[in-house]
Amino acid sequence: MPHTRLIATLAFSDGTPSVELPIIKGTMGPDVIDVRKLHGQTGRFTYDPGFMSTASCSSAITYIDGDKGELLYRGYPIEQLAVHADYLETCYLLLHGELPTVAQKQAFVDIVTHHTMVHEQMQMFFRGFRRDAHPMAVLTGSVGALSAFYHDSLNIHDPRHRDISATRMIAKLPTLVAMAHRYTQGLPFVYPRNDLSYSANFMHMMFSEEGKPYQVNDVLVRALDRILILHADHEQNASTSTVRLAGSSGANPFACIAAGIACLWGPAHGGANEAALNMLEAIGTPDKIPEFIRQVKDKNSGVKLMGFGHRVYKNYDPRAKLMRETCHEVLEELGLHDEPVFKLAMQLEKIALEDEYFVSRKLYPNVDFYSGIVQRALGIPTPMFTSIFAMARAVGWIAQWNEMISEPDQKIGRPRQLFMGPLPRDCATD
C-alpha cells in the first residue's frame, strides 16, 4: 500500500476553515491528495468529470508515463517484454507479479492449453445470434454466459477460485473469439489443438479449412503474439475501470469481464485500429493523400486523422515502434508492401512523420495504426479487430479485478455528482 509523508492544506475563500489532507506518494508518478475525509470535514465533494485528476485506486500492475512515452508491466519496460517474452509469460507476470521460471512457465502453459475447450452447449448459445451480429455483441454475451457453465469458481473471496477463473478466462477467450468469427462467416467451429502455442492455436481456430489445417508461419504467429503483449494492460483506462467498478459490487469475474468487453466496444476506446483502417479505405488511393492532409489541417472540415497521436502519450507511443517493426516484418513475409491499402498506409506514415504540422503536435502513428494494418495482413476481418483487443486485454482486466478483490479495504464503487436539476417542488393534483 502507498504511504503518507506530506500534508496538503486546502483553503476556502468563503470563510470555511481550512483542512489538512494527507499526500500519498507512490513508488513512481505524481503524488495524490487523499480526499476521502473531505466530505466529512467540509460537507463538500470534489468535481472531476471523466476522473482526469483522480486516482480511483492503488495498483501495482501497470505504470504509464505519458510525457516520457513509458509503459511498464510490473516494472518491466514494454520494449523488453515484447522482445524477450511471449504472451503467456506476460500473462503470468501480470497475474503473479514476476516472470515465470522455466518450471512455472511450463506448468502455466500446460494448464492454459488444457482449458481452451468451451462447454459443448456454447455452440447452441452461439446459434441464438443472427449471423450478421457484430462479433463484439457475440463476445459480450458469450463471456457473460460462461458463469452459467462454470459454477465451481465463482466464490470471489476464495483465492483459488479467482486463480481458476483467471486461467479459464485467458484460455477460453481465443476459442470464443474464433467461434464468433466463424459463426458470422457461416463457417464450422474449429476445436483447439493442444500441440500448438497460444497464438498459433488461435490462428488455427480462425483460419483452418475443412481438410486443410492452418499452416503455422512463425513470423505471423509472433506478430499476433506481439499484438497481444502490447495490448495486455494499460492501467486505469475506461474498460479496466468498468471491470473494477463492476467487480466492486461482488459480481462474478465472467460478468465483470463481459462488462469490460462492452465498454471496449465503444469507438472512442477499442475501435481505434478499426477506425484507422476505415480511414485508409476512405482515402482510397495515394494520389488523394494531399487533399486528405489538407482537410485534416482544416479545423472546419471535420476530417480526423485516425491512428495518430494518443490521449495518454504526449510523446511517441512506446508500443508503436514495436508494432511498426512487426508491421514491416509481416508485409515483407507476405509480400504485401505493394498492395494498395498497405502502400497507402506507408505513404501516409511517411508524411505524418515528416510534416511539421503533425510533428509539432506530436501526432505520431500510434499502436492502433500499425496493429490494424498487421491484422488486415494476417487475414483478420476489420469487424474482428476489437475482439482481438478484448482477447489480449482480458489478462489485464482479470489481474486488475483480482488485485481489487484482494484489497482489505475494498468498497463498492459509488461516484458522487454535482446536481444541477430543479429545486424541490410540489406535484399538483388539481
Image: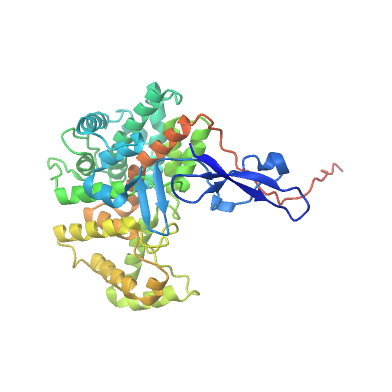
Residue placed at 22% from the left, 53% from the top?
Answer: 378
Q: Quadrant of the C terminus?
A: top right
Is 35 placed left or right of 402 in the picture?
right
Q: In the image, is residue 69 above or below residue 155?
A: below
Nearer the observer, 6 or 209:
6
Q: In the image, is residue 283 above or below residue 90?
A: below
Q: How is the model colour-coded?
A: rainbow
Nearer the observer, 335 or 121:
335
Q: Quadrant of residue 153?
A: top left
Residue placed at 65% from the left, 39% from the top?
Answer: 37
**Can see residue 324?**
yes
Q: Position of residue 228 (x, y in %)?
A: 29, 46
Q: Position of residue 151 (x, y in %)?
A: 40, 22
Q: Position of residue 45 (x, y in %)?
A: 67, 46
Q: How many marks?
A: 0
**Can see residue 131?**
no
Residue placed at 63% from the left, 51% from the top?
Answer: 47
Is 249 placed left or right of 389 in the picture?
right
Nearer the observer, 207 or 273:
273
Residue at the extreme top: 152
Nearer the observer, 133 or 136:
136
Residue at the extreme front: 5
Q: Quadrant of residue 286?
A: bottom left
Q: In the image, is residue 282 above or below residue 108?
A: below
Q: Position of residue 92 (x, y in %)?
A: 30, 36
Residue at the extreme right: 430
Q: In the image, is residue 299 above or below residue 424?
A: below
